[in-house]
Amino acid sequence: MGSDLVVEHRAFPLRPAPAADVPFKGTYREEGWRRCNQMSAGDGITFTPWPHAALPGWSLPALEAAKCVAKQGEAVFERVHIALYEAFFTRSLNIADPAVLAQIVAEHGADPARFSADRETGFAREAVLADYEAAVSEHAVRAIPTVIVPETGRALVGLADLAVYRSAIEEAAG
């Protein structure tokens, strides 16, 4: 659809506050990763089962990093955004760790000094939490991914096939 389709990324931390010792093995999380791996295998995407004792307790630091990088431009945001997902789901890196985030940002072409300065201002945390509050209060979002199609109000929640996205876009286009 080219430039007729606009995707606006908004942050949604599943845990707006950190949690300790979040289990993975034998949980719905592990099963979800297995399903994601099966669904995305044809696209060359790999979900590596989390090998560590516990998952990072929250995603807020990574969401803040994405907000900071977005200030540096759409192209660098897209690279870092994808790299953050890959770091967590494929490389099993803790994207709540500031050192890991700084490395990912630098590896994918963002200006590390600007990233650090922007992160220190605190604007990104405020922006992430504002996205979260809007998602919960305006759209009753409770899961990721959730895609809201503004033209129709349709919400696509969880794993969805490409055909479902196409249908929602075609419905919105009229």
Image (cartoon, rainbow, N blue to C red):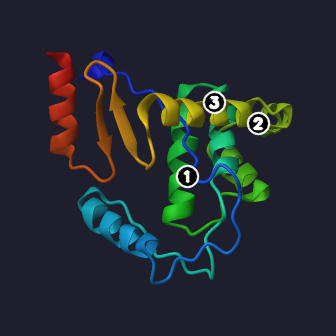
The answer for how far apart the CA atoms under marks 1 and 2 are is: 24 Å
Q: In the picture, which quadrant includes the C terminus?
A: top left
Question: Dot 3 lies on which element?
Answer: helix
Q: Would residue 33 appear left or right of 69 to someone viewing this image?
A: left
* Residue at 55% over, 52% down: 14
The answer for how far apart the CA atoms under marks 2 and 3 are is: 20 Å
The answer for how far apart the CA atoms under marks 1 and 3 are is: 14 Å
Measured as percent of width and height from the top left, residue 143 is found at 43, 50
Measured as percent of width and height from the top left, residue 42 is found at 23, 61
Check residue 14 in the rendering and tell me which mark sits there, or answer none: 1
Measured as percent of width and height from the top left, residue 54 is found at 63, 76
Measured as percent of width and height from the top left, residue 136 is found at 50, 37
Q: Earlier in the sequence, mark 1 or mark 3?
A: 1
Q: Earlier in the sequence, mark 1 or mark 2?
A: 1
Question: Dot 1 lies on which element?
Answer: loop
Q: Which residue carries the number 3 mark?
A: 130
- Residue 76 visible, this angle: no
Check residue 115 in the rendering and tell me which mark sits there, or answer none: 2
